[in-house]
Amino acid sequence: MAPSPPNSLFLESLVDTKNPLYYQNDHLTSTGSAVAMMTYESLYKPHNSESGGRDPFEEIKMFFGGLFAWWFFTSLLWCFNIGRIAVIVIHSILLIFFFKWLIKKCIILFKWSVWTYYRLKKTWYRIAAAFNSAKAQDKLGYCYERGIGVAPNYTEAVKWYSKAVEQGYANAMYNLGYCYKYGIGVPKNYTEAVRWFRMAAEKENGNAQLSLGYCYAHSQGVPQDYDKAVEWYRKAAEKGIARAENNLGYCYSEGYGVPKNASEAVRWYSKAAKKGDVLALNNLGYCYRVGKGVPQDYAKANKYYRKVAKKEAASGAK
């Protein structure tokens, strides 16, 4: 049976991270960032090793040429009534090997095309950024921060975020605040991070609202103030940010900035859990295990704990 979460769970449950699963839609998100990093780091290598460095399109052309020649030869034998059974057997074996080969090459081609797509995407971001597109500058900064299509370069990331910020782009403000908070390309500075989070939050950026709420909850760059933390968490939660929904639920559970309300906590945990937030799944499992805000139900508790375990296992495998 899983142990009950300690008081320090509040610290864990209010973590604000650039989780690609929950990154906002105008950024390089969810599938985008995960696939991009995966393709740049590893997917092009199988193409080189499995194909001997040859162009996969050239391999397919050569294979189909040989396949046509063989098919033509066996068809001639069929027409002259020479070894029809043997021809059928040979064709069947050939088909089996062909489909095995085809599946393998399709996988290689997919990896190669995705890798090429992100390389080209980075190039177009650079071109658009050069023409002063704030959105492209922000995305190019993110590519440099995460090493998507380019080698990671935090200084370049901050440079491009700053260019986008000069044009008042909210998501770049959030990203620049994130860099200051964690010391990415700039010295760590909570006060400066809060300044940028606030500017982005006031422009209705959901991730910035979540981060600003976290700063108020943990006195990072501002005096601790749970009322303001709840205010910003709620704004972000109303935009569907999963981690903000979890954090708001925890505030209701423990009475931070709001009166204790276990049922309301479960409601917000459930919203975040439906989006796959691992902390919300864990908190919801705990509620069902001890009967907090819901009838005690060990089966449901076990279900949510299993989901947490699977996500952590998958995360560890990566």
Image: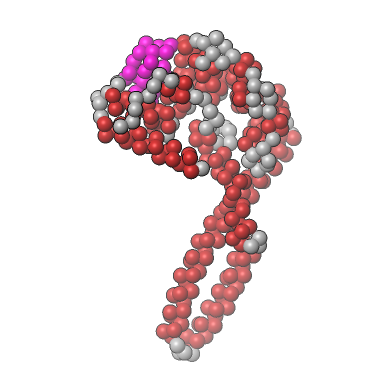
Residue name at image x 68 percent, y 41 percent: 151
Quarter of the N terminus within the rendering: top left
Give whichever of 127, 146 is nearer the camera: 146
Numbered range of the magenta stretch: 247-270
Does the magenta stretch mainly form a helix, a strand or a loop?
Answer: helix
Q: Nearer the viewer, residue 231 or 211?
A: 211
Residue beneath the point at 52% across and 64% down: 102
Front one among 3 and 44: 3
Q: Based on the picture, tell me whether residue 94 belongs to the magenta stretch.
A: no
Does residue 137 show up?
no
Position above or below: 59 against 272: below
For the image shown, how many numbered marks are present on the structure?
Answer: 0
Between residues 32 and 147, which one lies in front from this camera angle? Answer: 147
Q: Judge whether 194 appears above or below 4 on screen.
A: above
Q: Position of residue 226 (x, y in %)?
A: 47, 12
* In magenta segment, residue 255: yes
Q: Which image quarter: residue 92? A: bottom left
- Residue 162: x %, y % from top left: 70, 25
Please identify the residue farthest to the right as the structure is shown. Answer: 130
Left or right: residue 124 compared with residue 230:
right
Image point (42%, 32%), residue name: 278
Tell me how the rendering is colored. Answer: secondary structure
Q: Residue at x 54, y 59 (%)?
A: 106
Residue 258: image x %, image y %? 40, 11
In the picture shown, does residue 60 fall above or below 313? Answer: below
The answer to whether residue 297 is visible is: yes
